[in-house]
Amino acid sequence: MNAEQHAAIRSMLETHSTLTLATADADRAWAATVFYASDNECNLYFVSDYRTRHARDIAANPRCFGAINADVDDWLSVRGLQLSGSAEVVDGLARVNALRIYLQRFAGVKALFEKPRDKNEATIAERLKAANLYRLSPDWIRLIDNSKWFGYKFEVEL
């Protein structure tokens, strides 16, 4: 990926916050929306309870796919990313670093972690602290930007 492509992808990752994550078990595909934060290498980090369908799918088959885009109401405003890669739970020092990236992105979650305001927020904070933190490492990304021209896209393999 060249510097211009990297900058365009990073810009898209930084200006959006939700990923539609697609996973599959042996029989069926599944899609779930998750909040994500990303690093400079375009890895995406998200939090999820190990009991969710997508977490169970990742445990059985780490291969997954994703889409990131804003809702728009005309063709020329369509901009987004499509990606494929592998997801895994991050532990140890990698979790500490990934959590730092995640909490920098989501100030509300950081506030919950650092100083819950009431019992409800304390419960949410404890559940978030206990949840798995995942890294989705893309091996392929397509950027679509119809604002340049209808059908504009480029693809990179990582």
Image (cartoon, rainbow, N blue to C red):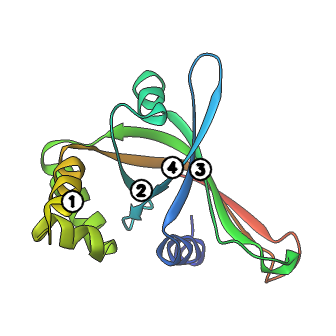
Disc 4 crowd rating (10 Å Cα; few below 14, some 14-19, many 20+) is: many
Q: Secondary structure at mark 2?
A: loop
Mark 1 crowd level (few <14, some 14–19, many ≥20, 10 Å Cα):
few
Nearest to viewer (mark 2 / mark 1): 1
Mark 2, residues whose alpha carbon is within 10 Å: few (<14), some, or many (≥20)?
many
Say which label, 4 or 1, has the lower sequence index: 1
Q: Quadrant of residue 130?
A: top left
> At label 2, which amino acid type do we have?
Asn
CA gap between label 4 and label 2 equals 6 Å
The residue positioned 64% from the left and 17% from the top of the image is 27
Mark closest to the chain's N terminus, 3 or 4:
3
Q: Position of residue 115 (x, y in %)?
A: 10, 71
Q: Earlier in the sequence, mark 2 or mark 3?
A: 2
Marks 4 and 2 close (CB-CB < 8 Å): yes
Q: Amino acid at mark 3?
A: Gly
The Cα–Cα distance between marks 3 and 4, rounded to whole angstroms, is: 9 Å
Q: Position of residue 80 (x, y in %)?
A: 67, 67
* Residue at figure coordinates x 32%, y 72% from the top left: 106
Which residue, given by chain and number where applicable, does mark 4 sit on? 138
Q: Quadrant of the N terminus?
A: bottom right
Q: CA distance from mark 4 to mark 1?
A: 35 Å
Q: What residue is shown with label 3?
A: 66
Q: Earlier in the sequence, mark 3 or mark 1?
A: 3
Question: Which dot marks residue 43?
Answer: 2
- Viewed as shown, does residue 70 lie left or right of 120? right
Q: CA distance from mark 2 to mark 1?
A: 31 Å
Say whether residue 118 is left or right of residue 74: left
